[in-house]
Image (cartoon, rainbow, N blue to C red):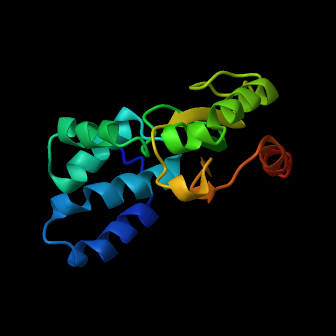
Amino acid sequence: MAKILSKKFYSEMAKLEPRYPSKVALLLPALHAAQDEMTWLPPEVLQEIADYIGIHPAQVREVASFYTMYNLNPVGKYHLKICTNVACCLRGADELVEHCEKKLGIKCGETTKDQKFTLMEEECLGACGTAPAMMLNNDYHENLSAGKLDQLLDGLE
């Protein structure tokens, strides 16, 4: 099977490996590094990670599907994850989701036709004190309003 992941991925794993008690402990960092490289984790990449670590591919998929931070389907260039847990909802998260849906012309779980934006609801981003919160790719944005959200989205290339 041809390798999909880059030499950079394998170099990064080689640097991390001495820090962990076993190669299996590299699973989460490997998933993160692969997703950073690919933007999502297709089945072939999960298989490659399983082969590298030396575990069954089902174990890799179990972990990747458990955590919402891993994308098992393609996502847009800008991945918006709006927290809709209770603290964020009390401070307007539902309205932000609706605002994004109208602005982007998609529903939660969808990607724009130009592959630029994917919109998702997130169960909790752990930012209750600064609600409502959203992640844009790997960056947190807190104390959001529709105006702040528009400004953020309009500033993207």
Q: How far across and down, in percent of the image, does residue 45 sit?
A: 37, 42
Q: Is residue 145 above or below residue 14?
A: above
Residue shown at 32%/67% (left/top)? 13
Left or right of 51 on screen, residue 82: right
Which is nearer the eye, 89 or 38? 89
Residue at the far front in the pictured view: 90
Displayed quadrant of residue 46:
top left
Residue shown at 24%/54% (left/top)? 52
Q: How far across and down, in percent of the image, does residue 150 sit?
A: 83, 43
Is residue 82 visible in the rendered image? The answer is no
Q: How far across and down, in percent of the image, does residue 110 sit?
A: 61, 24
Give the quarter of the figure containing the N terminus.
top left
Residue shown at 70%/35% (left/top)? 96
Q: How far across and down, in percent of the image, does residue 105 sit?
A: 77, 22
Count of labels in the image: 0
Is residue 79 visible in the rendered image? The answer is yes
Which is nearer the eye, 157 or 82? 82
Q: Is residue 20 above or below residue 90?
A: below
Displayed quadrant of residue 59:
top left
Which is nearer the eye, 153 or 37? 153
Which is nearer the eye, 150 or 9? 150
Residue shown at 84%/45% (left/top)? 147
